[in-house]
């Protein structure tokens, strides 16, 4: 269904409701962006693991002298300013947070693409959320 | 006929991604062989401690935990195969598979659970992902609240992964009570 774009608030982030809503497996495992569900998928131990875009704080890439390319994703955790999880932080006392993941990639072009897509999606969702918050006050 | 079940196109998932191959489930245990030769995985019936089914996108995943603390996941079973294999595990191996659900909410907060060599990240008691501590080359405390795990660089698996996990870190707020007073582990 597509009713969630209206009803979902940042206190109840849900990327997927059903396992089969996740993108079908591809031949090669890599970081993926699911624009429609506002999620990123990370290859961790042979599984594609979804994270809601609003959990992402920053994404950066860099390359070293051996032409290796790296992607680093930092997630929102409590105690950082302007974290959108404030309501959740209170609700999830005692939780452990995934803070950061770093990947080495074989494909610099794919890395640039993914970084750009994630940044754009993050910006769009953040803009929409702050607009909604403003309307609500 | 009661000898066992053979399935082609079953992927073994792990560090490095997935490899496709053939799995044979028989009363003596489980054998998986990589397509085209090479890697093989064999778990004897006597060495299996637990079996799990997990629904994954478009298929089902068989999880096998061995008594020596290893965990294997085999991906690509159809729903009807899950039913027949569940019966087989019960009647021929005396093991009842359990259902393990996948967390798909996309949250980055939850619980950390250790089992053998495996570290599982659980969200609302469902599993988001699992990593093997055997592949961790180094752990570091960063500040008072963060734990960083670095993975071995492995270029030899030949699996189908374009992006490989190198580091992962967890933030443990002071409000967490699970690991109070234990600074050597997350």
Image (tube, coloured by chain):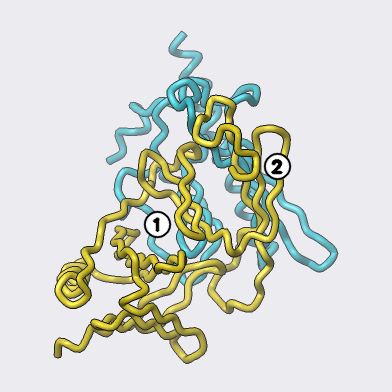
Chain colours: A cyan, B yellow
Chain assignment, label 2: B
Q: Residue at x 17, y 70 (%)?
A: B90
Residue B99 coordinates in the image, percent (x, y): 26, 56
Residue B175 visible in the shown view: yes
What is the secondary structure assignment of the residue under circle 2? Answer: strand
Nearest to the observer: residue B134 or residue B20: B134
Q: Quadrant of residue B81?
A: bottom left
Q: Tell which of A81 and B145 is nearer to you.
A: B145
* Residue underneath mark 1: A23
Judging from the image, what secondary structure is the residue with disc 1 in?
Answer: loop
At horizontal 49% and vertical 57% (from top left) the residue drawn is: B118
Position in image of residue B92 (x %, y %): 18, 77
Quadrant holding the N terminus of chain A: top left
**Is residue B129 depicted above or below B162 in this figure?**
above
Asked whether the beta carbons under mark 2 and mark 1 sit within 8 Å of each other, the answer is no
Residue A11 vs residue A121, the one in the foreground:
A11
Q: Circle 2 is placed at which residue position?
A: B141
Label 2 crowd (10 A; few <14 / some 14-19 / many >=20): some
Would residue B105 appear left or right of B116 to someone viewing this image?
Answer: left
């Amino acid at each position: 269904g597509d009713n969630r774009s209206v009803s979902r608030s940042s206190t109840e982030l849900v990327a997927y409701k059903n396992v089969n809503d996740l993108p079908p497996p591809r031949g090669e495992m890599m970081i993926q962006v699911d624009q429609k569900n506002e999620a990123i998928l990370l290859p961790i131990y042979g599984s594609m693991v979804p994270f809601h875009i609003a959990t992402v704080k920053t994404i950066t890439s860099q390359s070293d002298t051996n032409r290796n390319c790296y992607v680093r994703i930092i997630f929102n955790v409590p105690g950082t300013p302007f974290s959108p999880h404030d309501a959740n932080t209170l609700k999830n006392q005692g939780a452990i947070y995934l803070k950061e993941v770093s990947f080495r990639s074989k494909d610099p072009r794919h890395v640039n693409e993914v970084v750009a897509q994630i940044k754009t999606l993050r910006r769009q969702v953040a803009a929409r959320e702050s607009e909604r918050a403003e309307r609500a006050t | 006929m009661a000898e066992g079940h053979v399935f082609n196109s079953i992927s073994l998932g792990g560090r490095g991604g997935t490899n496709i191959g053939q799995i044979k489930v028989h009363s003596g245990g489980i054998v998986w062989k990589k397509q085209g030769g090479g890697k093989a995985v064999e778990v004897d019936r006597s060495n299996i401690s637990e079996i799990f089914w997990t629904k994954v996108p478009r298929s089902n995943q068989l999880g096998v935990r061995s008594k020596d603390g290893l965990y294997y996941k085999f991906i690509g079973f159809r729903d009807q195969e899950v039913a027949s294999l569940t019966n087989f595990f019960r009647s021929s191996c005396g093991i009842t598979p359990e259902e393990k659900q996948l967390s798909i909410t996309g949250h980055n907060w939850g619980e950390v659970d250790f089992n053998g060599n495996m570290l599982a990240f659980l969200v609302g008691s469902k599993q988001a992902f699992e990593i093997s501590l055997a592949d961790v080359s180094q752990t570091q405390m960063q500040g008072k609240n963060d734990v960083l795990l670095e993975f071995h660089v492995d270029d030899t698996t030949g699996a189908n992964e374009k992006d490989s996990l190198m580091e992962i870190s967890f933030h443990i707020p002071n409000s967490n009570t699970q690991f109070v007073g234990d600074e050597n582990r997350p």
